[in-house]
Image (tube, grey):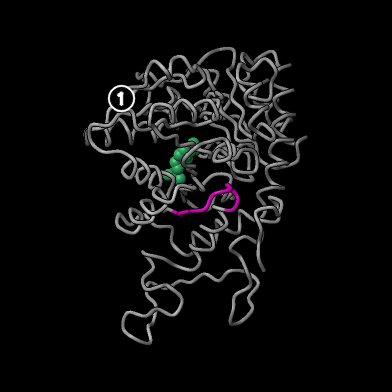
Amino acid sequence: MTIEPVDSFATRAIHAGQDPEQVTGAVVVPIYQTSTFAQDVAGETRAGYDYSRAGNPTRTALETALASLEGGKFGYAFASGMAAADTALRAMMKPGDHLIMANDAYGGTFRLIDKILKPWGISYDAVPLADLDAVQAALRPETKLIWVETPTNPMLGIADIAALAEMAHASGAKLVVDNTFATPYLQTPLGLGADVVLHSTTKYLGGHSDVIGGALITNDPELGDAFGFYLKSMGGVAGPFDSWLTLRGIKTLAVRMDRHCDNAEEIVEMLLQHPKVGTVYYPGLEQHPGHQVAAGQMLRFGGMVSFTVVGGLEEAVKVVSRTRLFTLAESLGGVESLIEHPGLMTHASVVGSDLEVPSDLIRLSVGIEAIEDLLADLKDALD
Ligand SMILES: *Cc1c(COP(=O)(O)O)cnc(C)c1O
């Protein structure tokens, strides 16, 4: 079976890299749970595999699928999103270089850059990436990278990928887009000019809250080589079973994302009407400052919704512990709905910094349960 780039997304999600296995015809890519591979003659592998840190067929299947979905030539699968981020940063930057990131970046990315890359010799500016003038002002001759998330976590801010790519390239920098929130179903940054796409596959791509993983995808052959070399040298590889779980999740990404978006849209409508709700953050709303840009670069607006509650921190903490179906937990992107308080949970590490989030903010990862049950659960918790 040959999968062509013109095949539609839902078809590629099920077939790219996932041909029936040659010997037995197994329709599903097997879990090649092996560390090493027999050779018939010293130095000659049977199918290009010698040791599973360097390469494993289940991981290759996942990497091929990921590259296909993002419209990239080179894909690499990591043990976590942070392993992918660390590899991208080390492969693309050296001590003395400068990077620009969002002032509401994912807390773990901020921690990696601030606590590990900064002591290594990297400097950074955290700016609101929706403000192109602020980005332009932060660019320096030694800026090598602009690191973008869009939509952002947890404020659902929107950055203009094409404009940032142009700005980065005009000053000799590269653009990395963390596409975790949107997924390639809703947004493909490489097509908009980004150099690298990063994923925490832990989230929507895996989709079932049962595996941690990460990915890097690029069309640039030099970066592709570098990522492959860093991956096998630094060793943060996705294991065979984790690769298989992620691949299994990816098969249903298109249908899941449509349902996540349908449910999120209805919840947003309910929250807007609710007297206990302050501000609702969702890029699908016309009043969202990034709505036009989001509409231009995204197919739909995703399953993440944030909002503030009347009554401040105390009330927000009560609401997140009162839901029945929305589970109080970190993470996002699974079939089950989750609720959390970013200030005390995912974003606790940025309290007191430029990246601090409002203390009355609640973040929802809207799952794919029946919408009437989700609406009732949230209303009960708010009332
Ligand atoms: C979760 C997440 C990460 C980190 O990924 P892990 O798989 O948890 O290591 C990076 N970026 C975003 C936007 C995330 O949501």
Q: Is the C-beta of the residue carrying label 1 under 8 Å from the nearest atom of ligand 1?
A: no
Instruction: Please name the residue that numbered disc 1 is placed on.
Output: 141
- Percent x, y of residue 43: 32, 79
> In the image, what residue occupies the spot 54% across and 59% down?
64
- Are there few (<14), some (14-19), or many (20+) residues within 10 Å of tag 1? few
Residue at screen point 43% across, 51% down = 221
Considering only vertical position in the picture, is 116 above or below 45?
above
Which of the 4 image quarters holds residue 275? top right
331 or 324, nearer to the observer: 331
**Residue at screen point 69% across, 47% down:** 254
Q: Kindly give the residue lying farthest to the bottom in the view shown.
A: 40
Magenta segment includes 80: no
Can residue 364 be seen here? The reply is yes
- For residue 373, above or below residue 256: above
Write down the quadrant of residue 115 in the picture.
top left
Q: Give the range drawn in magenta.
A: 68-77
Q: Is residue 264 left or right of residue 130?
A: right
Left or right, 256 with reference to 344: right
Please indicate whether residue 313 sits to the left or right of residue 40 in the image.
right
Across and down, in percent, residue 96 comes to 23, 31
